[in-house]
Amino acid sequence: MNSTPPFWTRDYVGIPFREHGRTREGCDCYGLNRLIWEEQTGLSLPSFATNYETCGDGLTIEGLLRAHGEDWFEVPAGEERLFDGVLMTGLFKV
């Protein structure tokens, strides 16, 4: 896999953090992922903006993804592709 990010990724640097944010005015982690998918692929992911208290609530977000997750699956190491996402839970408490 090429480790150089595509040029268009620069368009997302500097978007401020905003809890439950889903626009260029501000995004949380999932919101940024969702914004990139929509703008770069034309596909819309569910918002979930009102379904969790904070973005630090990784277990709730994981549950939301799994509940709506027919298209979510683990990607084996070495088989990553552009637009794959990473779900991290339990790393910190807010």
Image (cartoon, rainbow, N blue to C red):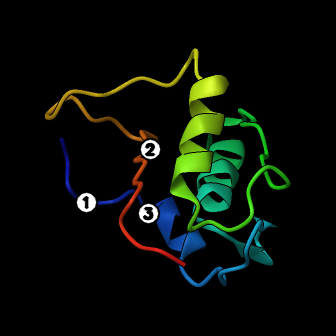
Instruction: Locate residue 50, reporting x and y percent.
Output: 85, 54
Q: Label 1 vs label 3: CA separation? A: 9 Å
Camera-nearest residue between 70 and 64: 64
Q: Earlier in the sequence, mark 1 or mark 2?
A: 1
Amino acid of disc 3:
Phe
Instruction: Locate residue 22, reporting x and y percent.
Output: 78, 61
Q: Which residue is mark 3?
A: 7
Asked whether the beta carbons under mark 2 and mark 3 sit within 8 Å of each other, the answer is no
Q: Is residue 49 above or below residue 93?
A: above
Asked whether the beta carbons under mark 1 and mark 2 sit within 8 Å of each other, the answer is no
Q: Is residue 15 above or below residue 85?
A: below
Q: Which residue is mark 1?
A: 4
Query: Would residue 30 be found to the left or right of residue 92 on screen?
Result: right
Q: What secondary structure is found at the residue carrying circle 1? A: loop
Q: Which residue is mark 2?
A: 85
Q: Label 1 vs label 2: CA separation? A: 17 Å
Q: Is residue 6 above or below residue 63?
A: below
Q: Residues within 10 Å of mark 2 (few under 14, many from 20)?
A: some
| Residue for point 58% across, 15% down | 70
Q: Quadrant of the N terminus?
A: top left
Query: Would residue 4 be found to the left or right of residue 45 on screen?
Result: left
